[in-house]
């Protein structure tokens, strides 16, 4: 697979999603967690989404429980937490694994296209962010401690 548009995932609602529906859009794909020190980034992500969504920009949130078991809830718990605490309106997907043999194929692709520090193929922690251009190509990986507001220039450049 050569593009993020070649993958499928399940929305947090359980409905299947073909990522080709996002063709032509700039994407920020993020592994998230509700009980992490970086969880307040949901607010910054929502602010980015509101700022750019009318310009063919989407944020795709993928909850993951692989880092310190910081996403223990089920889909309903996660969805409710994100809505009530941060007013999240960008698409959230079902909880997945981002590392290991059972990693979601999308994240295997993201990691291979934008390796981490020293070429690592692992996601380091919650709120690792992958920026994808309109052609479905991974442009850059951002670390968990990169605040969403700091990504605005890179997003703007692709829009």
Image (tube, rainbow, N blue to C red):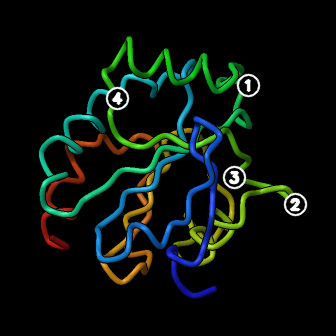
Instruction: Identify the residue under disc 2.
Output: 101
113 w.r.t. 101: above or below:
below
Foreground of the two, 109 or 149: 109
Residues packed near mark 3 inside 10 Å, few (<14), some (14 to 19) or many (20 plus):
many
Give the quadrant of residue 39: top left
> Under tag 4, what secondary structure?
loop
The residue furthest right is: 101
Q: Which of the image's four quarters has the C terminus?
A: bottom left
CA distance for labels 1 and 3:
13 Å
Instruction: Identify the residue under disc 3.
Output: 98
Give the quadrant of residue 100: bottom right
> Under tag 3, what secondary structure?
loop
Name the front one of labels 4 and 2.
4
110 w.r.t. 39: above or below:
below
**Residue 98's spot in the image, x, y percent?**
69, 52
Residues packed near mark 2 inside 10 Å, few (<14), some (14 to 19) or many (20 plus):
few
Return the mark for residue 88: 4
142 w.r.t. 89: above or below:
below
Marks 3 & 4, CB-CB < 8 Å contact? no
Give the quadrant of residue 38: top left
> Under tag 1, what secondary structure?
loop
Return the mark for residue 69: 1
Q: Residue at x 85, y 56 (%)?
A: 102
Q: Earlier in the sequence, mark 1 or mark 3?
A: 1
CA distance for labels 4 and 2:
30 Å
Q: Residue at x 50, y 75 (%)?
A: 5
CA distance for labels 2 and 1:
18 Å
Q: Is residue 45 left or right of residue 35?
A: left
**Residue 91's spot in the image, x, y percent?**
42, 43
């Amino acid at each position: 697979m050569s593009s993020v548009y070649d993958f499928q995932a399940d929305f947090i609602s359980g409905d299947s999603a073909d990522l080709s529906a996002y063709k032509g859009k700039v994407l920020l794909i993020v592994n998230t967690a509700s009980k992490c020190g970086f969880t307040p980034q949901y607010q910054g992500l929502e602010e980015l989404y509101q700022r750019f969504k009318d310009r063919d920009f989407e944020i795709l949130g993928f909850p993951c429980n692989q880092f310190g078991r910081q996403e223990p809830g089920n889909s309903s718990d996660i969805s409710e937490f994100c809505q009530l605490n941060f007013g999240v309106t960008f698409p959230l997907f079902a909880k997945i694994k981002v590392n290991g043999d059972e990693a979601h194929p999308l994240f295997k692709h993201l990691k291979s296209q934008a390796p981490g520090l020293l070429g690592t193929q692992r996601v380091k922690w919650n709120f690792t962010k992958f920026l994808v251009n309109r052609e479905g190509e991974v442009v850059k990986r951002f670390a968990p401690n990169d605040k969403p507001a700091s990504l605005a220039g890179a997003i703007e450049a692709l829009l």
